Every structure is written in C-alpha cells, then in structure tokens.
Image (cartoon, helix red, strand yellow):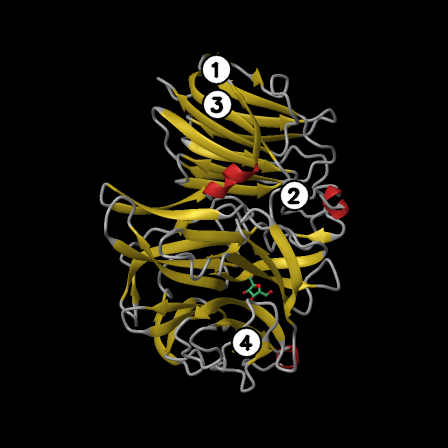
Amino acid sequence: TTKVYQEKHRPQFHFTPEANWMNDPNGMVYYEGEYHLFYQYYPDSTVWGPMHWGHAVSKNLMHWEHLPIALYPDSLGYIFSGSAVIDYENTSGFGSADKPAMVAIYTYHNMEGEKAGRNDFQSQGIAYSIDKGRTWSKYEKNPVLKSPGIRDFRDPKVIWHKESKKWIMSLAVQDHISFYSSSNLIDWTFESDFGKELGSHGGVWECPDLFPIKVDGSDGVKWILIVSIGDGGPNGGSATQYFIGDFDGKEFVSTEKDIKWLDYGRDNYAGVTWSNVPEEDGRVLFIGWMSNWQYATLVPTENWRSANTFPRELILKKENNKYHLNSVPVKELELIREECYIIPNQDIKGNFDVANAIPFKAIPIEIDLEIVWDEQPQKFGIKLSNSVGEELEAFYSGVDESFTIDRTKLKDSSFSDAFASIDKADVSCKTGIKLQILIDESSIEVFVNGGEVVVTDQFFSTEKFDKLEIVSGGNISVKEAKFYKLKSVW
Ligand code: FRU
C-alpha cells in the first residue's frame, strides 16, 4: 500500500488516479492478458480541465498499474471520451498481421472553436499503438469524422460487426445516437439515428455503447444500447439508461417503451463495456465513473477526484417474455476477499449489531445476505454509523416495495446542495431478498436480487464508520449472511 492511498476518503478496492482529476472511463480494451483502462484525466488540477487520456492496466480487474498519460491534447483540441479496439485484421494498416494495432477512437473538443461561437467544435480523431498501448501515434490526417455543425457530437464507441465485416461507431449527438460504419477505422459512413422519441431526455445524451449479448440460459442474442444522460436521472443528476433491441449492421431497433436504468444510485455515470474480451471468457464487462456532474468537482477529497465503480458483469435475463439487464460484481472480487464472518441461520427481529461480532473493521467490506420472510418487513437492511452520530442506511421497505440508500445523515455535505440525498428504486420482494453490498471508504454499491436493481452512491463521512448493524423492522429469517473483509488493491 502506497502512502497516497492512506488519505481520507481514499477508496481501497476501487480504481482512482494517483492524483488529480478523473472523469469517464475510456478505451477499455483487453489485449494479451491485460485489461486496459484509459480515462478522462486532467493532470494539473483536481477539477475538470484540458482533457487527456490517463492510462492503467490490470491482469485481473482488481489490481491496477498506473501508466504514463496515453493521449495529450493537441492543436485539434482536448481529448474527450472514446473507445479502443484491437485491429486484428489490420484494416487500418497501422499494424501488421502479427502485430495488430490498438486503435483509440476519441472526440476532439476544440476550445477555440467553442469560444468563437462555432457549432462544429467536436470531431472524431484516432490514434494507434503497436506496443500494447504504451506509446501512441495520432493519425496524421485527423479528424476522421468532422462535425456536421451540431454542438454535441461525441464519445465514439466502436465495435467490429462480424456479420457485415465492418466497424460500427455509436456516437452521442445531443438528443440521439448516430451510427456510422467503416471498413478501415478511417473513412466513416453515416448509417442511421436512434432515440429522439425514446428513452429519457432529461439531459444531453453522452457515452453510448452498442453491443450484442447472449440471453442468459439460452442461445438467443439481443443488442443493448447504453446511453448516459447528463441530467434527469432517476434520483437526480447524471445517470445511465439502456435500450434492448436488435441491430442489423445499419439500424438499431427497440420496441420497448419503458425507460430502463442501469443503476438507480447517483454515482454511476458514463460507463461502457470492455472491447475484445476473449470469446472463451464471453463476459460483458462494464465499469462506470462513480460520480455525478452535479457535484463531481466539489466532493471533499484533496489530492485526487473521483473513483470508478467496481467492475461489473452485465447479464441479460429473460423472464415472462421480458428482458432485463442485470449487473453483478465481477467474479474476480474473490481475489480481494480476506477473512469471512458468517452469521448462523436464525430469525431476527429488530437490530443486530454486526460490528461487535465481526473480528475486523467495518470497512472495506462485502456483505452477502439472503433473507426470507412470510410477511414483507416494514424495513430491512444495513446501517453504518460512527461515534459522531453520522449514519448511512441501505434498506428495503415492504411498505412501498422499494430499495433506498439514505445519505442525508452525514455531518458535512455542505460542499454541494445536490449531495445529501435519499436514492430510491422500485423493487418488489414478496418472499425475501438477496443483497450483495460492497462498501469502500467513500462508496456503497448495492446489488439487489442478483443485480436486478443496482444502487451506487458515494458518501463522505467526517469520521470513519466503525459500527455496522443489520436493521430489521419485521420478522425475517437469515438463510445466508456473510461478511468478507476486503483487501486494499494498492
Ligand atoms: C461525460 C462527458 C463526455 C465527454 C467528457 C468530457 O461525462 O461529458 O460526453 O466526452 O465527459 O470530459
């Protein structure tokens, strides 16, 4: 554990930059045993500024090695969000048959253009690396896709579409997603638009991600389109919605009318999935930025700002002819589990002080609960507290069938009016509930019923939480209750 990771509020098992400002995860790609993570980075300050791509790699999604900055702003502009792919067939000509290029596709944000009041200041550029992402060359004829004169024209996510043997780019264009195709990552052709009349439009559309996914337990395949929106999330501020549909290489069609949220918490934004995960692995792996534009630049961390969510696997479920995208922590979580404390099966009424029973500190921790009941409890969940009277609660309520994280009982959330919040998600648990909860120094992620509903929230307590209780307003019976001490990954 390095010294910087001892700072107040510093996450112990989530990715954070060593110092300074981070926002969206970018260019996640798997190549030769390494998961790459690039990210929106401003190396000169703890607030947003001229954007670079920071870089880190991991062999197991848990332990990260920080690498030098991958992409610096240039005369065309700041380097905004985007993606990376391995060009195995050398369609671009940047690599060779035995040394395929890693190609990054990103947005140029031209400040001079924006200041001059032009509307074409966002365009797409590409860069490539033939040494496993360690050094990068920008394509000399950038940009490869110029703005049609729409202010918001950004965040290219590129995939290889096997059936049509073409690259497909999803691009966020103000209030919709545009799809472009290319045979070489350089020349792009407009294919279609999606979403003007569908989904939530409480804010600008950003960071799209289109990918196929197997229907769990069957051979069927559907396509998911993830779209982040800058404002108007289910509990306020920035959030991520998704659409389920089909894609034929040209058009994405979704017949579902209801709005679907990937996460109901306030702190999971701009997330996308890893490219080039080996077929024999087959997982769809996701990571998001664990913050919210409402207060991201104001949170009380000193030397760095922002963390990512815990990496998640996305699983498409089909039940009663309806599709639903579940998110669960990646199985590599096992690697950071230490001691385990188990509460024996029993009936509980009222509160149960766990911190007194477990032989380790309350945080960082993983809590796995499987609870059954005859009658839905008025309340069931966990409560963290400390000696200065701060509390954080995460609980199910049978009264209105919802799951809530309440972070209003922290002493000092004065850094932003938008922070203190009660974040709620509808979920019906007639006969019991399964909860998997990951708690780090300043974040809580709750996966309800196998990730059917997820709530991710940051919290900043003035003192560390050292008391952990199970709170129960009703008669519940414990089928499983495990508490894992989690190791620092730094
Ligand atoms: C999303 C976003 C992207 C943009 C980037 C700039 O959080 O606004 O749309 O590319 O951040 O840093």
Place of residue 92 in the rendered image (x, y in percent of width and height, measured from the top left): 44, 80
Q: Amino acid at mark 1?
A: Pro
Residue positioned 46% across, 41% down in the render: 331
Q: Amino acid at mark 3?
A: Ala
Q: Which residue is mark 1?
A: 344
SS at mark 3 in the image: strand
Residue 423 visible in image: no
The response on whether ligand 1 sits within 8 Å of label 3 is no
Q: Amino acid at mark 4?
A: Ala
Q: Amino acid at mark 2?
A: Pro
N-term-proximal mark, 2 vs 4: 2
SS at mark 1 in the image: loop
Rounded to the nearest angstrom, the CA distance separating label 1 from label 2 is 30 Å
Q: Which mark is residue 319?
A: none
SS at mark 4 in the image: strand
Rounded to the nearest angstrom, the CA distance separating label 4 from label 1 is 55 Å
Q: Which residue is mark 3?
A: 481
Q: Which residue is mark 4?
A: 127
N-term-proximal mark, 3 vs 4: 4
Rounded to the nearest angstrom, the CA distance separating label 2 from label 4 is 32 Å
Foreground mark, 3 or 4, reads 4
Rounded to the nearest angstrom, the CA distance separating label 2 from label 3 is 24 Å
Residue positioned 43% across, 54% down in the render: 241
Rounded to the nearest angstrom, the CA distance separating label 3 from label 1 is 7 Å
For ligand 1, the image quadrant comes to bottom right
Crowd class of label 4 (few under 14; some 14 to 19; many from 20; radius 10 Å)? many
Q: Is residue 263 left or right of residue 464?
A: left
**View extreme (front): residue:** 98
Q: Which residue is mark 2?
A: 11
- Whether residue 172 is situated above or below residue 7 in the rendered picture: below
Residue sitting nearer the eye, 120 or 306 = 306
Place of residue 415 in the rendered image (x, y in percent of width and height, measured from the top left): 72, 47
